[in-house]
Amino acid sequence: MDLGIIGQAAGLFAVTNIDDILILALFFAQGTGHPGSTRRIVQGQYLGFAAILAVAVAAAFGATFLPESAIPYLGLLPLALGLKAAWQGWKNHRDGAVDEEAEQSKEGGPGPLEVAAVTFANGGDNIGVYVPVFATAGVGGMTVYAAVFLPLVAVWCFAGRFFATRPVVAKALARWGHILLPLVLIAIGLLILIEGGAFGL
């Protein structure tokens, strides 16, 4: 394997996924104290990123699953999840701490499909960058990119969990995470919609 292309792949992954570390840290903070939440978050991240890769590879071969005009509307996914999280947070706050604890133990933190939906929706820029790179890299190059990207997803998950478990960060996320997560998801959703010109924005 050419070390140059491995370095390019690692750099490309880092640049296009830097925002995912914050989102992952928020998800890991939300899952604190729930058995199996780490596994579900990692599964969701891999599922969402695999979908991004599949769409980018298909587009590079010219068989797009999503028309380019549809990509900005992916912003509706994190927007909806953010509004749902904000509603649940407000409802839990209104009903009191005891009910909130019961609700959290029932939900068990974020599920894999929720994490996957946010990862995929936030990956519109990834797809836009990966498609021309994959198209020029050919099948061999795409294989190398995928072989580098997939282990880096695990590194990203580890980094998100690392930040979420640092005492200072964990304390801040425990106090403000229920507010930050909806705000971040809503902001990501609106950014994707606005930057993509969805609904004529």
Image (spheres, rainbow, N blue to C red):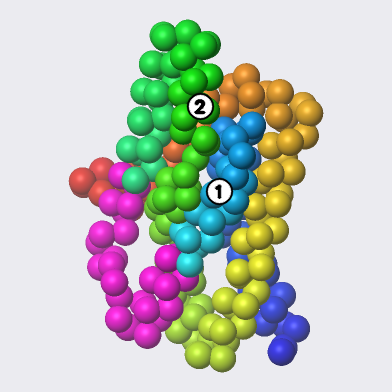
- Please give the name of the residue rendered at 50% of the width and 54% of the height, measured from the top-left corner: 44
> Can you see residue 126?
no
Q: Position of residue 8 (x, y in %)?
A: 66, 75
Which mark sits nearer the N-terminus, 2 or 1?
1
Residue 172: percent from left, percent from top: 68, 24
Q: Secondary structure at mark 1?
A: helix
- Residue 45's place in the image compared with 160, above or below, is below
Crowd rating for badge 1 (residues with CA inside 10 Å; few <14, some 14–19, many 20+): many
In this view, the residue in front, 39 or 23, is 39
In terms of secondary structure, where does tag 2 sit?
helix
Amino acid at the residue labelled 1: Ile
Residue 20 at x, y percent in the picture: 57, 49
Query: On the image, numbered disc 2 is attached to which residue?
Result: 104
User: Which quarter of the figure is the N terminus placed in?
Assistant: bottom right
Kindly indicate whether the residue at mark 1 contacts the one at mark 2 (C-beta within 8 angstroms): no
Q: Residue at x 71, y 23 (%)?
A: 171
Q: Which residues are magenta?
A: 51-76
Question: Quick check: 134 left or right of 171?
Answer: left
* Disc on res. 72: none
Query: Could you tell me residue 101's position as x and y percent?
Result: 53, 19
Looking at the rendered structure, the kind of residue marked 2 is Gln
Q: Dot 1 corresponds to which residue?
A: 41
User: In terms of depth relative to the viewer, which is nearer, 151 or 16?
Assistant: 151
Q: Please identify, in this view, whether the residue under mark 2 or under mark 1 is nearer the observer.
A: 2
- What's the magenta bit mostly, secondary-structure-wise? helix
Instruction: From the viewer's perspective, tell me whether residue 193 is left or right of residue 142.
Output: left
